[in-house]
Image (tube, grey):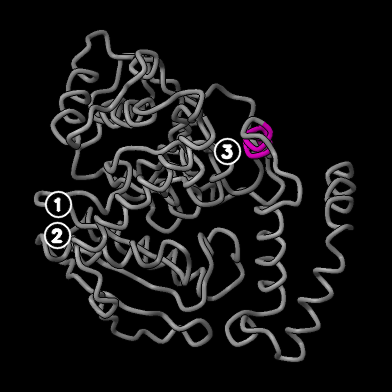
């Protein structure tokens, strides 16, 4: 622990000028963020931005290594590790390939053979541990027994199938334990957080294949599984932050959700976003879902950065976000018919809810598709110039 504190101090020392500048501007009310954020949050956001855009570019492998560190398991949380064995047949892979080829654009999608390997998929069963204290460690019992203890604390059949964020190449279920623990606590259920294969070492559709295997594992557990079969109506898909990564080699349009032609048949969907880079496409997607007859609850949080509820955890807006997220999860499990579509903006300091017009930006489907195609053409040109 002492080593970690020293390392943190050494990391922050070069950032002291930035911290002082942000603090002074905030105290004098001269910064834009001062109208919406407290001082601690403003400094946190500025520091994160400085680390995300470092002076010295780092390799993907270096960045991955930093985000895959396991911080350990302490506090009011149950974690039980399980590796789902691969299905003995190829039906999962065949169905996935058929779906990809059905949806593909006019150009072929090259799929490396190794990305279609069906391998064991590790996951973390996560639950809330009410009687523990902040420094509690897990008891020295088997993973199966840990799961049994976790299950004793569940008051709801809700099972959250969680896919962590990180643009498909960063992070891990370990980094998202605070989130899955909180969702388990608020819903009274359990989370099954998937350690899917990361790119670029495991290209598309490796992660998608792992996700599908994980869903089927919940429905049809193998004989060595800890859990009983989970009813499909008790499973809720959840996750965060998996945008199109602009640093990759150009990809086919299907990598972004806004290019889907038709969402008919999709389940009710909850979306939350801040004032961030992805806000416009999030609003467009929510509008498209609504137009296709899907129930969608969209919450925009005034002046909040990307994944704010997981980063600025002390803000009232973060608590409001998790409460809204959990309420939606509870509703879709208990009574999906009770959900009504809505779009609101939530004010940063008052949490006042204001009705939001998703069509106000006047983005049409044709405009969005053209922007995506233009981005692809631009990347192709950039790539060709470097060859």
Left or right: residue 113 compared with residue 269:
right
State yes or no: discs 2 and 1 in contact (Cβ < 8 Å).
yes
Locate the N terminus by quadrant. top right
Q: Position of residue 228 (x, y in %)?
A: 29, 28
C-alpha separation, residue under disc 2 versus residue under disc 3: 33 Å
Query: Quadrant of the rendered structure where residue 27 is?
Result: bottom right
Helix, strand or loop under label 3: helix
Say which residue label 3 marks: 174
Q: Residue at the location (61% across, 69% down)?
A: 314
Of 106 and 90, nearer the camera is 106
Q: Residue at the location (86% across, 45% down)?
A: 7
Helix, strand or loop under label 1: loop
Say which residue label 1 marks: 263
* Callout in the foreground (2, 3): 2
C-alpha separation, residue under disc 2 versus residue under disc 1: 7 Å
**What is the crowding at mark 2: few (fewer than 14 residues within 10 Å), some, or many (at least 20)?**
many
**What is the crowding at mark 1: few (fewer than 14 residues within 10 Å), some, or many (at least 20)?**
some
State yes or no: discs 3 and 1 in contact (Cβ < 8 Å).
no
Say which residue label 2 marks: 294
Query: Quadrant of the rendered structure where residue 33 is?
Result: bottom right
Q: Residue furthest front?
A: 385
In primary-sequence order, the first of circles 3 and 1 is 3
Q: Residue at the location (36% across, 84% down)?
A: 353
Part of the protein shown in magenta: 62-70
- Confirm whether residue 20 shows in the render: yes
Q: Which mark is residue 44?
A: none
* Callout in the foreground (2, 1): 1
Q: Is residue 20 magenta?
A: no
* Callout in the foreground (3, 1): 1
């Amino acid at each position: 622990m002492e080593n970690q504190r020293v390392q943190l101090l050494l990391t922050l020392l070069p950032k002291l000028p930035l911290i002082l500048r942000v603090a002074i501007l905030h105290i004098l009310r001269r910064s834009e963020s001062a109208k919406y954020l407290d001082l601690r949050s403003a400094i946190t956001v500025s520091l994160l931005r400085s680390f995300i855009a470092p002076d010295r570019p780092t390799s993907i492998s270096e960045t991955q290594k930093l985000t895959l560190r396991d911080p350990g398991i302490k506090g009011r949380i149950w974690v039980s590790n399980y590796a789902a064995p691969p299905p003995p047949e190829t039906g999962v892979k065949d169905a996935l390939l058929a779906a990809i080829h059905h949806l593909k654009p006019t150009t072929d999608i090259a799929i490396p053979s190794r990305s279609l390997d069906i391998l064991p998929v590790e996951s973390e069963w996560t639950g809330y541990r009410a009687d523990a204290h902040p420094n509690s460690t897990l008891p020295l019992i088997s993973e199966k027994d840990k799961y049994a203890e976790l299950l004793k604390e569940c008051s709801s059949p809700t099972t959250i199938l969680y896919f962590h964020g990180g643009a498909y190449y960063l992070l891990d279920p370990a980094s998202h334990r605070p989130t899955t623990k909180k969702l388990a606590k608020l819903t009274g259920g359990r989370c099954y957080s998937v350690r899917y294969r990361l790119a670029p070492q495991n290209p598309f559709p490796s992660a998608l294949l792992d996700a599908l295997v994980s869903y089927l594992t919940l429905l049809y557990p193998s004989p060595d599984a800890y859990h009983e079969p989970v009813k499909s109506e008790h499973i809720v898909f959840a996750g965060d932050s998996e945008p199109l990564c602009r640093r990759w080699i150009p990809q086919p349009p299907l990598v972004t959700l806004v290019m889907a032609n038709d969402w008919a048949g999709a389940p009710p969907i909850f979306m939350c976003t801040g004032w961030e880079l992805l806000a416009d496409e999030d609003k467009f997607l929510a509008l498209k879902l609504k137009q296709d007859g899907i129930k969608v609850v969209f919450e925009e949080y005034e002046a909040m950065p990307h994944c704010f509820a997981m980063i600025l955890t002390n803000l009232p807006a973060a608590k409001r976000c998790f409460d809204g997220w959990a309420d939606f999860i509870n509703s879709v499990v208990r009574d999906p018919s009770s959900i009504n579509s809505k779009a609101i903006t939530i004010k940063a300091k008052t949490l006042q809810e204001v009705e939001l017009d998703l069509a106000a930006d006047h983005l049409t489907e044709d405009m969005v598709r053209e922007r995506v195609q233009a981005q692809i053409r631009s990347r192709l040109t950039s790539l060709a110039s470097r060859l």
